[in-house]
Image (spheres, rainbow, N blue to C red):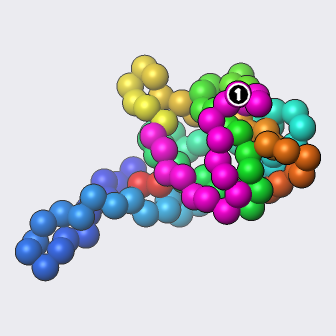
Amino acid sequence: MTTPKMPRDGNNHSIPVLRPRAGGAWQGNAVAATSRVGPFTEGTRVISIWAINDVRFQTGDGTVVASATSHKLGAGERLTISLGGGDDLHTHIAVIRDGGVDTAVEVSEME
């Protein structure tokens, strides 16, 4: 894996932004029961998530579960989050709908 270089501003200072990883787009469905997206590409430390309707989510390993008390992502919002690092690097995200409407969830690995 190559190390991406940060873009620079007019004063030649690094701009701390990430870009979507090529081949790192995932789609999932938030339904009445937990569904999982992953495992993410080895070494992925940041993801961005988006859904057209409200969802609840939780990151973790291959057994992670989302519930009505998990973190909320509002309809149409995009959230970029850390997956941790070292021995506590999460590899999956679990989602569940927040309300009565099933919805697609888009997840992008960032680098």
Q: Badge 1, how many Cα within 10 Å: few under 14, some, many 20+?
A: few
Q: Residue at x 91, y 46 (%)?
A: 100
Residue hosting label 1: 69
Left or right, 41 with respect to 88, comes to: right
Left or right, 78 with respect to 19, comes to: right
| Magenta-drawn segment | 66-82
Q: Residue at x 38, y 59 (%)?
A: 18
Residue closest to the eye, 68 or 19: 68
The kind of residue on which mark 1 rests is Thr
Q: Residue at x 60, y 27 (%)?
A: 60
Residue 91 forms part of the magenta stretch = no
2 in relation to 83, above or below:
below
Quadrant in which the C terminus is drawn = bottom left
Quadrant housing residue 104: bottom right
Left or right, 59 with respect to 5, comes to: right
Residue closest to the eye, 31 or 4: 31
Point out residue 105 in the picture as x, y percentages from the top left corner: 73, 54
Point out residue 95 in the picture as x, y percentages from the top left corner: 74, 39
Disc 1, SS: loop
Farthest residue, direction bottom: 10
Point out residue 101 in the picture as x, y percentages from the top left corner: 89, 51
Q: Residue at x 82, y 49 (%)?
A: 29
Residue closest to the eye, 37 or 67: 67
Whether residue 68 is visible:
yes
Whether residue 108 is visible:
no
Question: Total of numbered circles in the picture?
Answer: 1
Quadrant housing residue 24: bottom right
Point out residue 84 in the picture as x, y percentages from the top left corner: 43, 32
Farthest residue, direction left: 11
Left or right, 33 with respect to 40, comes to: right
